[in-house]
Image (cartoon, grey):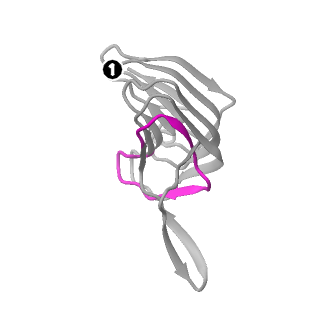
């Protein structure tokens, strides 16, 4: 198991440490990844806190929360890049993103065998989960199990789950 250790900016004032933000992270090798705490992040427009750019990845949030802490537009919690397969995202919460909670974007190769389980999508600006294909490519064998969608789609006509082609 690989642990995702995000470097956090922290400020200590009168003995109290305030975690300010986490930088974006790219998972580029197969394996099982976990996070070990709630992750606040102060993101730039158009980025995701975690980008998955590999096949055969399990990302276990271990009941922790990915939480956007600023109002920058079009920020997603987790993105799965073009054509990656055998991806599992489990056990956590994605909150306050101005974009999508999770976005899957096959553009030149199909994405296959994606499982999203036990995730709470809360206050996502566009949609909790977006499957966005283009050029005739799509996501196949997608399993969404035991997920909760709370107040998603507040910045668009999208809702809890959106399919865009």
Q: Residue at the location (38% across, 21% down)?
A: 133
Quarter of the image containing the C terminus?
Answer: top left
Q: Which residues are magenta?
A: 27-49
**Picture quarter with the N terminus:** top right
Residue 39 in magenta?
A: yes
Residue with the mark numbered 1: 134
Question: Which residue is at the far bottom?
Answer: 14
Residue 132 on the magenta span:
no
Helix, strand or loop under label 1: loop
In the drawing, does residue 14 fall left or right of residue 98?
right
Which residue appears at 51% of the width and 24% of the height? 86
Residue 110 position in % (x across, y down): 40, 18
Asked where in the image residue 138 lies, by quadrant, the reply is top left
Give 66 or 99, whichever is nearer the viewer.
Answer: 66
On the image, the x and y values in percent for residue 32 come to 56, 38
Q: Is residue 157 above or below residue 50?
A: above
Which percent across, then down, holds residue 66? Answer: 55, 50
């Amino acid at each position: 198991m690989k642990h995702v250790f995000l470097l956090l900016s922290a400020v200590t004032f009168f003995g109290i440490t305030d975690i300010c933000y986490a930088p974006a992270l790219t998972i580029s090798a197969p394996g099982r990844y976990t996070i070990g705490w709630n992750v606040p992040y102060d993101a730039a427009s158009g980025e995701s806190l975690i980008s998955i750019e590999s096949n055969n990845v399990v990302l276990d949030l271990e009941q922790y929360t990915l939480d956007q802490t600023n109002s920058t537009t079009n920020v997603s919690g987790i993105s799965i890049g073009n054509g990656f397969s055998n991806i599992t995202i489990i056990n956590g919460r994605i909150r306050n993103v101005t974009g999508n909670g999770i976005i899957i974007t096959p553009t030149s190769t199909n994405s296959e065998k994606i499982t999203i389980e036990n995730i709470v999508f809360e206050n996502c600006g566009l949609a909790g989960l977006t499957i966005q294909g283009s050029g005739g490519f799509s996501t196949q064998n997608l399993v969404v199990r035991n997920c909760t969608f709370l107040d998603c789609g507040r910045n668009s006509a999208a809702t809890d789950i959106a399919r865009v082609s």
